Amino acid sequence: MSPKKSGRKAARDSESDDLAVPAVASAAKATRPDGSRRVVITGAGTINALGHDVTSTLEAFREGRCGITQLNFRDVDRLSIQIGAQIHDWKPEDHFNRQQILLYDKFTQFTLLSAKQAVAQSGLNFAGKLGLRSGVILGTAGGGLNTWDDNYRAVYEEGKNRVHPFVVPKLMNNAAASHVSMEYGLRGPSFTVATACASSNHAMGLAFQMVRSGAAQVMLTGGSEAMLCFGGVKAWEGLRVMSKDACRPFSANRNGMVQGEGAGVFVFEDYDSARSRGAEILAEVVGFAMSSDAQDIVMPSAQGAERAITGALHDAGLNPDQVGYINAHGTGTAANDKTECAAVAHAFGHHADRLMISSTKSMHGHLIGGTGAVELLACVMALREGVIAPTIGYQEPDPECALDVVPNEAREAQVDAALSNAFAFGGLNAVIALRRI
Amino acid sequence: MTDTITIKSRIRAIIAEQAMLEPDQIADEATPEDLGIDSLGLVESIFALEEEFDISIPFNANEPEKSDFDISNMGTIIAAVERLVALKAA
């Protein structure tokens, strides 16, 4: 099936008609029509419940494997939610020395491992001038939440009056970004973004804009989350939006989200720079848009989501019918999935019935602030390998989610452009557009 | 009987506070929506009821209709809380 070939005329709305000139030329031009730089992905790394690297994660996507299992950590028996996409076989001592482990919360450890893979794949060396022109922007919602949890326990529950001197540098939300900058000598713009479930997409969008504007030549970007500890899950329990048995996005019998943990890091690089050094290009980042609902602290808005989607298309210079795949926010909650489907249906018109949209959270869980980074891998896989990651756990059609959600099994399809959606609590939306290159 | 009346009035007081109304304005047939209680307000009310009566209310906001805890209106909420309080006492 080749969605890109069907219905080219069908789905043009008035907004897309204004964009008849593609902003991204397929020829080897270094700049976009507006004179800004083109941005490409030249490296990727991850660790999540599906695998400790990109290869194993994509293999799990192809197999439709579920990484959600029984949670295992201290005091888990006092939780009413007992499942999560936890990385059970994580051994920090395999990757870091004693001093590093004392200084790195788990979310930093996950980040550094992912960054190492991404930088290795890119083949970049940041010594000299390149380091001055490179930076790192990462997303996380909870930062060093395990460190907070352990140390609150020490002082409140165990009555200790002393904590380790590294508690603050370990738990701060920017710790991961700072350690990545130190590891690779990235001396340009570096910071951390916290927008709940959209953190990684906001981070990657900003990194894209940095390279596109020429403010940086290379940006490491993505996000990380390590919230699977007693306090982290207990907090989520309170909202009563968690499933006790499975994450079933878009399925009529879905009953909530399931948390995950891990990280994803990418190398975003100036197209000219990547071409001139003969780097392997995984995909082009062509558009990004943000919007806020300005409406409710937890309930999503279809209009807000739609504005981010159409904004990303506009920024990318893509017509709606050029998009073959969307990696959905798809949390598996009643509210998100129907709202997201309404937003997609409205943004794409008739083409909504031809594109594929899947939620990989059904496999790797919801990595909260890190989720967009792991999910971007599914977009890269769709563009590069022509394989669409499925929405697993899908059991019953929901008339309010009547799109092609690629149920349960991966599918082969040629895709030229893909979107990745993220819609955070607080009504903060961020959508990224990628293109095959 | 006195216990039942007390439980009812305590529940009404909790819901009334959430709805920013007086307890005597909370009719048995009133739905959460009638009282202006949205999804977050409902989850907060359920938490307050759990704390007040030291009970655990099985409620998933994604499938409220499947829950044993019937939130259709004030009458069903009161009945469900009374049942959980009785179960706890038994």
Image (cartoon, rainbow, N blue to C red):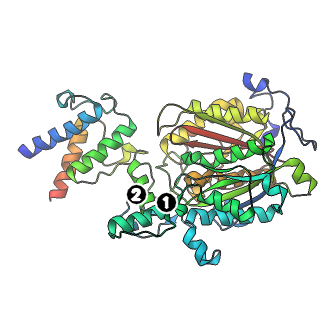
Q: Secondary structure at mark 1?
A: helix
Q: Is residue A129 left or right of residue A397?
A: right
Choose top left, top right, bottom left or bottom right for residue A286.
Answer: top right
Q: Is residue A404 left or right of residue A293?
A: right
Percent coordinates x, y for residue A216 in the rendering: 78, 47
Task: Look at 86% across and 48% down and name the residue there.
Answer: A271
Nearest the eye: A184 or A227: A184
Nearest the eye: A62 or A167: A167
Does the rendering let one see residue A277? yes
Marked residue chain, label 1? A
Query: As shown in the figure, which amino acid type bears the numbered disc 2?
Result: Lys
Percent coordinates x, y for residue A347 in the rendering: 66, 31
Task: Look at 66% across and 65% down and name the residue there.
Answer: A112
Choose top left, top right, bottom left or bottom right for residue A106.
Answer: bottom right
Query: Counting other residues with Cα less than 10 Å from the Cα at mark 2, is it few (<14), some (14-19), or many (20 or more)?
Result: some
Q: In whole angstroms, how far apart are the C-alphas of marks 1 and 2?
A: 12 Å
Q: Residue furthest top?
A: A14
Nearest the eye: A161 or A37: A161
Question: Which disc is residue A145 wearing?
Answer: 1
Q: Secondary structure at mark 2?
A: helix
Report which residue position mark 2 lands on: A234
Q: Answer above or below: position of B34 versus A323.
A: above
Q: Is residue A23 left or right of residue A368?
A: right
Query: As shown in the figure, which amino acid type bears the numbered disc 1?
Result: Leu
Percent coordinates x, y for residue A261 in the rendering: 56, 61
Both marks 1 and 2 on one chain: yes
